[in-house]
Image (spheres, rainbow, N blue to C red):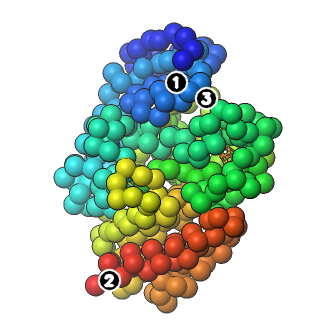
Amino acid sequence: MKSFTYERATSPENAVAAAAHTPGARFIAGGTNLLDLMKLEIEAPEHLIDVNGLAFDTITPAQDGGLRIGALVRNTDLAAAAEIRRDYAVLSKALLAGASGQLRNKATTAGNLLQRTRCPYFYDTHQPCNKRRPGTGCAAIGGVSRQQAIIGVSDTCIASHPSDMAVAMQVLGATVETLTPNGQARSFPLTDLYRAPGETPHLETTLAAGELITSVVLPKPVGGKHIYYKVRDRASYAFALVSVAAIVQPDKTGRVALGGVAYKPWRNEKAEALLPEGGEAMANELLAEARPTAQNSFKVKLAQRTISMALAQAAY
Ligand code: SF4
């Protein structure tokens, strides 16, 4: 690991100011992904700003009957919160489907959203990877690609986003709140946090350098049956091949988001409008842009069947 300097932020304003004035700075909270990346020298921040002491560790009522989840709320605490289990059960289920108990105890809400891909070539520094080193190529294209994305891919990167939590937040219509480097508050839909790989897969989010996520806001509960169904290579502690977050209402309307298939949780409201016609029509529309490799073309059928399974579980 390369040497770095370290400080503890004493306020959000102090944290973003420190990031703005220190080249190569990164925020750190749970560190469950960043520390691994630093040990492998995939990331080598020159300065770490520890934000663990900031007061972003609570879940509080938001306007219009929603909930504001602080960026530092640990995944374990979020999954167990009574209001999450009661009104946003898909989120609790998704969290509990991810990682391990020990990791969930450390991992934070913001860190979960910002975790980086688990593409094996990204973590193997002997392999070409446009995301790790722009312009070097993509070992996954033409390589082992069964875990990779099938939607929103480009000729430079086919990595998928690994988060389960983000898939549930996407189906719930979450909003991200941040503090920009000049101290301004900003909020935007979660779906706008992630950038498509395009020609620049190393640019993964729309955050400015030094912009700090402060919270995630869930709109007021929508009721319905909440399902999170995750298909993976082993029963626990594995990333999704395909996951489905679904909220279904008694009149058969609803929402569906997919995990494990794209650079971000994949949701399409045009597809959801087809839900009353049945899961197959909805799945076909949702997967219409799929561009799989020979090794992961099975994900198209797997996604269709996982959607059917989730909708069957949600049936009234
Ligand atoms: Fe790197 Fe993306 Fe290719 Fe994986 S899929 S090797 S992360 S460029």
Q: Earlier in the sequence, mark 2 or mark 3?
A: 3
State whether residue 316 is above or below residue 196.
below
Distance from the alpha carbon under mark 3 to that under mark 1: 8 Å
- The reply to whether residue 263 is in sight is no
State whether residue 226 is above or below residue 17.
below
- The reply to whether residue 247 is in sight is yes
Tag 2: amino acid:
Ala
Q: Which residue is mark 1?
A: 39
Q: Which mark is residue 144?
A: none
Which is nearer the eye, 65 or 171?
Answer: 171
Question: Residue at coordinates 64% horizontally, 16% vertically from top-left?
Answer: 23
Specify few, some or many for label 3: CA neighbours under 10 Å numbering under 14, 14-19, or 20 or more: some
Specify few, some or many for label 1: CA neighbours under 10 Å numbering under 14, 14-19, or 20 or more: few
On the rendered image, what quadrant is the N terminus found in?
A: top right
Q: Which residue is mark 3?
A: 42
Say if mark 2 contacts mark 1, CB within 8 Å.
Answer: no
Q: Which mark is residue 315?
A: 2
Element under label 1? helix
Report x, y in % for residue 68: 34, 45
Element under label 3? loop
Element under label 2? loop
Report x, y in % for residue 153: 69, 57
